[in-house]
Image: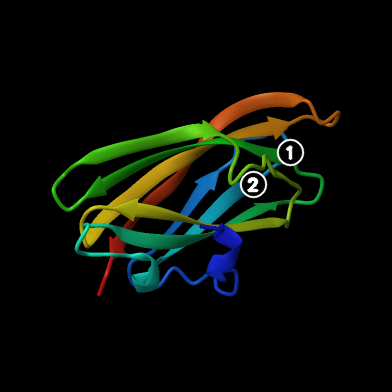
Amino acid sequence: MDPHALELLNSADPGQHGSDTITPVPNDIGDASVRIRVRPEYLPSRSDPRQPMHVFAYHISIDYQAIDGGPTVQLVDRFWRIIDAHGTEEVVQGEGLVGQQPTLRPGEKFEYASYCPIRTSWGTMEGRYGLLVLDEREQPASRQDVEVGRFYLVSD
């Protein structure tokens, strides 16, 4: 399934089952933060409850806010914890976000859509992104985790 075909890039509103998390980014210049909004959506046309297989899309909007002259950041990896209604947990981790390691300057945003199949009609996801704070030469100066708050995968 092609995540771009999900056509979810039109709304950053997390809705009633989504997540909206802000994480401060320590640096020497001043205030900076990363805001991550997640909007999940059930995909009945891609699901088959008889299997059982329920497919959920999720749209992620990552906003980086910092004062002028603030550091550039790069999202380099991700970790997801997916739990279905039976309590079965799956961990997904690896480099990049949908094959990319986006670099963001103050005021920039990165958006993407992906999907998650689970065996029950509801579940949860939560996780984190690995974030590098880059120095003025665009070299890694520090690393931190940016939390993605729990969101709910619900088929109704």
Given the current orientation, which residue lies at the most extreme left position? Answer: 86
For the residue labelled by badge 2, is the local secondary structure a helix, a strand or a loop?
Answer: strand
Point out the image quarter for the C terminus.
Answer: bottom left
Given the current orientation, which residue lies at the most extreme front position? Answer: 51
Indicate whether 145 appears above or below 85. above
Indicate whether 34 appears above or below 54. above
Q: Residues within 10 Å of mark 1 (few under 14, many from 20)?
A: few
* Residue that mark 2 sits on: 32
Type of the residue with mark 1: Ile
**Which residue is more in the foreground, 130 or 87?**
87
- Where in the figure is residue 39, as x and y percent of width and height? 44, 65
Quadrant in the picture for residue 139? top right
* Left-right relation of 118 to 147: left
Type of the residue with mark 2: Ala
* Left-right relation of 50 to 105: left
Residue beneath the point at 35% across and 60% down = 55
Q: Residues within 10 Å of mark 2 (few under 14, many from 20)?
A: some
* Residue that mark 1 sits on: 29
- Where in the figure is residue 85, as x and y percent of width and height? 17, 53
Which color scheme is applied?
Answer: rainbow
- Where in the figure is residue 23, as x and y percent of width and height? 51, 46
- Where in the figure is residue 149, as x and y percent of width and height? 39, 51
